[in-house]
Image: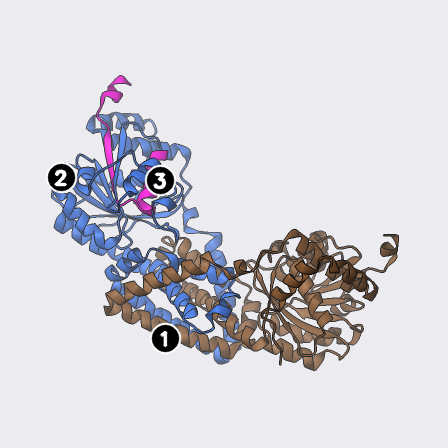
Chain colours: A blue, B brown
């Protein structure tokens, strides 16, 4: 134990301490890993010290570069368009074997930037936690934000197994469910189930709000309207960057949505029976989807599993020696380990 | 007190014991009014007795007609298209001075039917509680469903002040906030803030679900997708009837929504700056809307106010003698009463 304490702490750097970065910090700190220092930086004045007061980081750095220096894992949690710039800023100081990940809502562009900007001696494994809420900023951060949420893991083609495992441990430590996916698929799917809903939400609110009758209509709004327009309260920087970096796929789904609305327009206009069937069918399909949510297809992460991910992260952080020790220990738990690996690899495919 | 107990109980009939009818029953019963019997009927087998077991009604009637017989207040809480039929069924047995109300999601058609079907000696005051959830049926009923919700009150042009006050008391007893509005306005506004969101929700879910990539996309869905598609799990009978009875207005808003989406399509395609401004503006507008929701423009109903509404309802139920007594009592509370009246009448207008 004394040996362990005499080791220099492993460092995780979080660049960008908004809702996502701050929540990751809180969730990592809640795991109480030993020999770990979480250093954070946010370009907005006062956010770093605030994150430290809230317990999301151990120490606020004065710039991205000093946060990333000597870090074993660098998490870039800024809006997508800022990621490239952060990569450029930290690239010169990243140490050998450093693992870089991000939390951006689109992945193809980010993967491309990582190849262009980051040095050969670091690994990039993209990430995208599918969680959020309409409030933004460190004050909205929540250690439980990622509980049971899908967390996309998108390794660069050159990323090492060790780097992938490090990000996988991060995902499990914060309570999320890793989904291995390639960047193109990711961007195409989230365009449908995340970015299209965002645009719908914004458009519905602006349509109603810009109507002359809004003051009267507003009085009649209920939970349905509030739920449907919730995403319109999201951070406009983030939404904007999503639209810019996933433009073509969002336009594709927007066109399909307009066609779908035109189809419902026809049903409502003069096809009563078909309209009823479509409504009943959709209700059934959605209830089936809810009754068997994808999260439930995999067994929930057990306490033991979370602890074990914590050990893996710790081992990654404090160096190869401990890696070997943990490897020896984990042989005794091999059965469970294999199960976990099968689950983790289930959807892993080669990345371009 | 003995005199009060010797009076025959006043009767409220609820026809249709689904989510709305059942919740109204629970909320009315929770007010513990004296001398009140709540009788219910649902055409689905077993629902009446179940509602009785759950405490939503005192007694299940064997048909709509026997529920409505001798009732002082008849609440029709069926899907919209069934309302006319229920009116026809109960019309022959409604007693002199009976007040009939409904909870239908559209009002113009319902008001027209009431003029055609109900006898001259009863009053019709349409109602529409702007509350709900995606589950339907008596098992989803909840006494707090209407708490702080807007409740549209749409009196027929011939409805008496007494009838309007009875429905107003009902609204307050169940914890809702009355909004006086005419039928055409109501249907036009809810087409925008309630029915359009419903169609969007259904269309978004069916679009995603019918996509070939759905099994993979489903794994990436998060709270945003679930919130945006929530209304797609609503009762298809209800949704269908809404579309049929408010067809033109829904089509109007659907067309406007398609145009709005086309506008966002342009912004996303090649107007980055304008897109950002639109996103930021919408976020600001929505946050302003949330910070000052219409419900907060009026002071929340106080305990005393609820009790007083309960007294009003009771007075309505047990006859003119008590009405006068309560009127005398309430003079001592005149200041508060006037305030309440101003608030209640603020948006009342003549009905066609």
Return the mark for residue B259: 1
Letter of the chain that mark 2 sits on in the rendering:
A
Q: Can residue B50 be spotted in the picture? A: no
Letter of the chain that mark 1 sits on in the rendering:
B
- Most extreme residue toward the top is A2
Q: Tell me the quarter of the picture where residue A39 sits.
A: top left
* SS at mark 3 in the image: loop
Q: Can residue B349 be spotted in the picture? A: yes
Q: Give the Cα separation between the discs numbered 2 and 3.
A: 27 Å
Q: From the viewer's perspective, is residue A160 above or below residue A202?
A: above
Q: Give the Cα separation between the discs numbered 1 and 3.
A: 42 Å
Q: Tell me the quarter of the picture where residue A189 sits.
A: bottom left
Q: From the viewer's perspective, is residue B218 above or below residue A318?
A: below
Q: Does residue A236 appear left or right of residue A120 in this picture?
A: right
Which residue corresponds to mark 3?
A174
Q: Give percent across and percent down for residue A43.
A: 24, 46
Q: Does residue B299 appear left or right of residue A12 in this picture?
A: right
Q: Give the Cα separation between the discs numbered 1 and 2.
A: 50 Å
Q: From the viewer's perspective, is residue A332 above or below residue A209?
A: above
| Magenta residues, start to end | A1-30
Which residue corresponds to mark 2?
A93
């Amino acid at each position: 134990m004394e040996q362990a304490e005499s080791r220099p702490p492993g460092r995780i750097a979080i660049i960008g301490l908004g809702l996502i970065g701050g929540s990751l910090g809180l969730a990592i700190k809640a795991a109480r890993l030993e020999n770990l220092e979480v250093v954070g930086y946010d370009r907005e004045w006062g956010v770093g010290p605030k994150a430290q007061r809230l317990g999301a980081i151990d120490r606020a750095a004065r710039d991205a570069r000093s946060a990333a220096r000597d870090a074993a894992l660098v998490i870039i949690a800024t809006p997508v368009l800022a990621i490239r710039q952060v990569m450029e800023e930290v690239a010169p100081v990243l140490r050998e074997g450093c693992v870089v990940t991000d939390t951006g809502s689109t992945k193809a562009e980010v993967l491309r930037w990582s190849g262009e900007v980051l040095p050969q001696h670091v690994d990039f494994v993209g990430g995208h936690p599918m969680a959020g809420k309409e409030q933004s900023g460190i004050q909205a951060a929540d250690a439980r934000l990622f509980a049971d949420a899908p967390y996309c893991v998108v390794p660069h083609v050159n990323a090492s197994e060790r780097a992938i495992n490090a990000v996988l441990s991060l995902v499990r430590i914060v309570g999320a469910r890793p989904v291995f996916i390639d960047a193109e698929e990711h961007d195409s799917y989230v365009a449908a189930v995340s970015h299209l809903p965002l645009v719908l939400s914004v458009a519905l609110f602006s349509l109603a709000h810009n109507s002359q009758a809004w003051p009267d209509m507003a009085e009649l709004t209920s939970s349905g309207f509030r739920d449907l327009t919730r995403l319109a309260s999201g951070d406009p920087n983030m939404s904007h960057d999503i639209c810019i970096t996933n433009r073509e796929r969002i336009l594709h789904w927007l066109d399909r949505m307009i066609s779908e609305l035109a189809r419902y327009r026809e049903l409502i206009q003069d096809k009563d029976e078909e309209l009823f069937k479509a409504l009943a069918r959709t209700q059934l399909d959605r209830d089936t989807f809810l009754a068997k949510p994808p999260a439930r297809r995999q067994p929930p992460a057990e306490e033991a599993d979370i602890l074990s991910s914590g050990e893996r992260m710790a081992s990654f952080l404090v160096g190869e020696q401990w890696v070997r020790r943990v490897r020896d220990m984990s042989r005794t738990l091999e059965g469970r380990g294999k199960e976990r690996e099968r689950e983790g690899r289930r959807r892993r495919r080669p990345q371009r």
